[in-house]
Each structure stands twice: as C-alpha cells, then as structure tokens.
Image: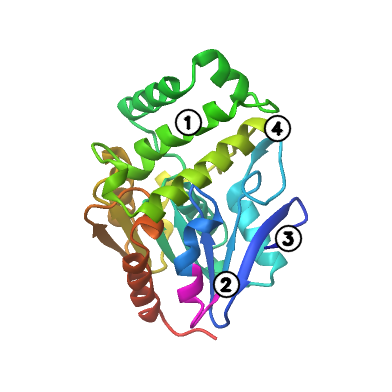
Amino acid sequence: MAMIDTGTTRLAYDETGSGPAIVLVHAGVADRRMWDHQFAELSRHHRVVRYDWRGHGGSADHEGPVRHHEDLLALMDALEIPEATLIGASFGGAYAVDAALAAPERVSALALVCPGMSGHVWPEVFSRIGRQMALAAVPHERLALYQAGNADPDSRDVAAMADAQARFMVLGPGRSPEEIPTEAWDLSLLMLREMFARLWSSPAHHTEWPERPAADRLHEIGVPTLVVKGLSEIPQVQDVADLYAEGIRKARLLELPDTGHLPSVERPGELTAALTEFLKELPQRS
C-alpha cells in the first residue's frame, strides 16, 4: 500500500502494470481489496490503480461532507493520469459517473458494476427494508450513538451489523452464504467488519453529491460503457443498472445469473473476462 497527498486528503492506493490507465473504485460495502483479481489480471495490458475512498480502508479520516468524485479526479491528478477508464462498483460506480460528467475529457470509458447513481430516488420499500435490517442487528440507541461517530463500538455489534449487511446487500434476497464461494463470503465479512469498526469510531462524514446529479444527465455521457448487474441482488439496485443501460447511448448491459452485489468477489474470473473483452474493444490509446 502507498499513500498519496491529493491536496485535500491522503488516499491509500495500489498501482501496477503499464499501458492505458484504469482506475478501480470500490463499493460502499467494501474497500479496494474487492478488486484483487481484476487488479492483478488487468495489469497485463494496463496501468491499474485501485484506492480507498476518503474515510475508508487505509485512507485518511474526514469529518463532514465529502465529494468522492472530486477525490477520484484529484487522485488522477496526483498520479499524473490525464485520462483513464473508470471501473466502479455500487456507489463507486456513481462516483465514476459523476467524475465523467464533471471532467469528460478525463474519462475514456466506464464500467459500472451493480452501480448506484447520484440523484436517484430510492423507493420507500428499499429504505424501509434497510432500516429494518440495521435495527435487527443493533438496537436503535446504540446504532444512533455509533452513527454519530467517534464512538467505541462493541465488537459484537460490529460483527452483527457486518453479517446483516452482507446478507442484505452482498447476497441479495433469499440467498444463503453457502451459495457463494467460502472465500467470497469471508472477504465480504472481513471488509464489512473493518468498515463498520472504522466508520463508527471515526469522525462522522457523508457524501456530498454534485449540484447537477447524474440521474438527469445520462444522455450527456458519450463514452463506451459496460453496465453489469447481478440477477440475485436487490431488485431496486438492479433497476439502477437498467437506468444506466437505457440512458447512456453507448451502453451495453451484462447480466450475471446467480450473482449478488459484489461480482468482483463472488465471480472474479467471469467479471474479469467481461472487463477484458470490453477493454479490448475500446479505441487504442497511448
């Protein structure tokens, strides 16, 4: 792991390979380790960078609002990457899209894996189920204390929330841990435990979205885009992938059966093969 100063924060990152640049942006339920397979394999023909969001993994703490898409562009500046293919998962996909809209000359292509979207209004049923999941894992009084930040969370609460979130987001409705590879489940739990332990014990922070969110601007995206969705994950998240596939004129949709929210962990070889094929089809760049 290396650390780099972007001018506003310090971000933990890894870099390998040479050739056209790729930046991997992790999901909110994970950290840069979710890209282990893609990071190694894509570096055969590309310069590949993966990093932890501000306030996550090995990156610096932060208090208050964070503009993650600006951190992404600042990371590219600091690493002297003028242009890159951005591969983002979950809310990392949303940040990649916002970066592409903010600086279209910096982004040559997008791959959005089970993505979120700035400006998207989540259905009430999705928010309600999420709240119920959280409160079933950790009682309201303790959860409110933890969410305020700078707490000393009980390790049992951390483990309970990680397990609940993994079942809710990583697996999807009606699936059990036995249905995915053991190493995928173990890594998912590890990343989530470390995430909640860090999140609850650090200063409280939140994402600040662009004034002009992506939900109203998909028609402005003109670069080749691969959209990946797992057919076993929460239907409301699948719907966001469909919005991207329909709203971006150069988008192609890849549906992965029996796959939840983290295909890079659950089906690493299959996702890497799809990304490799997508990258081969892009116009050649120096």
Residue denoted by label 3: 3
Residue 46 drawn in magenta? yes
User: Where does the image place residue 125, in percent across and percent down from the top left?
Assistant: 31, 26
Q: Nearer the viewer, mark 2 or mark 1?
A: 1
Please name the amino acid that badge 4 sits on: Pro
Quarter where residue 215 is shown: top left
Q: Quadrant of the N terminus?
A: bottom right
Q: CA distance from mark 1 to mark 3?
A: 29 Å
Query: In the displayed structure, would residue 24 be above or below residue 147?
Result: below
Query: In the displayed structure, would residue 1 be above or below residue 278?
Result: above
Is label 1 in contact with label 3 (beta carbons under 8 Å)? Answer: no
Q: Nearer the viewer, mark 1 or mark 3?
A: 1
Q: Nearer the viewer, mark 4 or mark 1?
A: 1
Residue 182 is left or right of residue 54, and the answer is left
Is label 3 in contact with label 4 (beta carbons under 8 Å)? Answer: no
Please provide the residue range marked out in magenta.
39-47
Residue denoted by label 2: 83
Query: Is residue 108 visible from the viewing direction of this image?
Result: no
